[in-house]
Image (cartoon, rainbow, N blue to C red):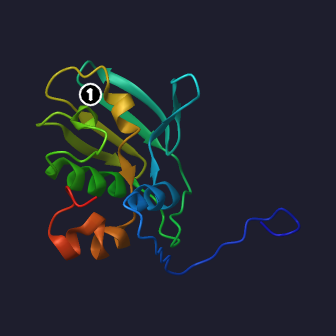
């Protein structure tokens, strides 16, 4: 923000140097966002997901916020949600806190339009919205370059 409270747009590459084994958390929380967050009472609140609705007991539709830019000025869309979903579904344990945050094997994500996605679960999943708190959205450049270690290690699991 400048002195007139106007948002200043910047571009460029963010380089973080931190030898801490918890560095991935710092990078994650400062460069990525989730569809939902949890408030202080543990209630699910919107973040990049503007709203959601259960189409049936195995299909969750999420409407995404419009006009959201990643830190490199890439426009956020349902294609980014799909890309991130596909990467995370490949992992046996995508979340250090535990596999309970995983979507079940067989979960599919369908892009409905530029700002709408549908999660199709193999069976009802009452924790689906809570699990979305642990599914972070990175931009295209992230997955093309480091992608949680893929480029260097061919895996993103277990190196933290």
Tell me the element at label 1: strand
Q: Is residue 64 above or below residue 147?
A: above
Q: Position of residue 62 (x, y in %)?
A: 40, 37
Quadrant that contains the N terminus: bottom right
Please name the residue shown 22% across and 36% down the image: 99
- The quarter holding residue 25 reads bottom left
Q: Position of residue 121 (x, y in %)?
A: 19, 30
Please name the residue shown 43% across and 30% down the image: 52
Quadrant that contains the C terminus: bottom left
Looking at the rendered structure, the number of numbered marks drawn on it comes to 1
Q: Position of residue 12 (x, y in %)?
A: 53, 81
The residue where tag 1 is placed is 59
Q: Is residue 52 above or below residue 86?
A: above
Residue lying at the far bottom in this picture: please name it. 12
Residue lying at the far right in this picture: please name it. 4
Horizontal side, residue 13 vs residue 130: left or right: right
Residue lying at the far left in this picture: please name it. 106
The 10 Å Cα crowd at callout 1, few under 14, some 14 to 19, many 20 or more, is: many
Q: Position of residue 148 (x, y in %)?
A: 29, 64
Please name the residue shown 48% across and 64% down the image: 75
Of residues 156 and 6, the one drawn nearer to the viewer in this rendering: 156
Horizontal side, residue 82 vs residue 136: left or right: left
Of residues 153 and 61, the one drawn nearer to the viewer in this rendering: 153
Residue lying at the far front in this picture: please name it. 20
Of residues 29 and 45, the one drawn nearer to the viewer in this rendering: 29
Q: Is residue 128 above or below residue 63?
A: above
- The quarter holding residue 97 reads top left
Of residues 38 and 36, the one drawn nearer to the viewer in this rendering: 38
- The quarter holding residue 7 reads bottom right
Please name the residue shown 39% across and 60% down the image: 24
């Amino acid at each position: 923000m400048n002195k007139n409270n106007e948002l200043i747009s910047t571009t460029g590459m963010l380089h973080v140097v931190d030898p801490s084994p918890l560095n991935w958390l710092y990078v994650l929380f400062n460069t990525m966002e989730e569809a939902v967050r949890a408030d202080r009472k543990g209630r699910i609140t919107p973040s990049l997901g503007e709203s959601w609705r259960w189409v049936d007991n195995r299909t969750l539709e999420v409407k995404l916020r419009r006009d959201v830019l990643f830190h490199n000025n890439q426009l956020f869309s349902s294609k980014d949600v799909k890309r991130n979903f596909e990467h995370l579904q490949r992992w046996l344990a995508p979340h250090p806190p535990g596999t309970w945050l995983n979507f079940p094997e067989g979960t599919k994500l369908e892009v409905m339009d530029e700002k709408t996605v549908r999660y199709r679960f193999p069976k009802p999943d009452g924790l689906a919205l809570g699990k979305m708190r642990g599914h972070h959205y990175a931009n295209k450049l992230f997955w093309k370059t480091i992608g949680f270690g893929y480029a260097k290690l061919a895996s993103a699991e277990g190196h933290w």
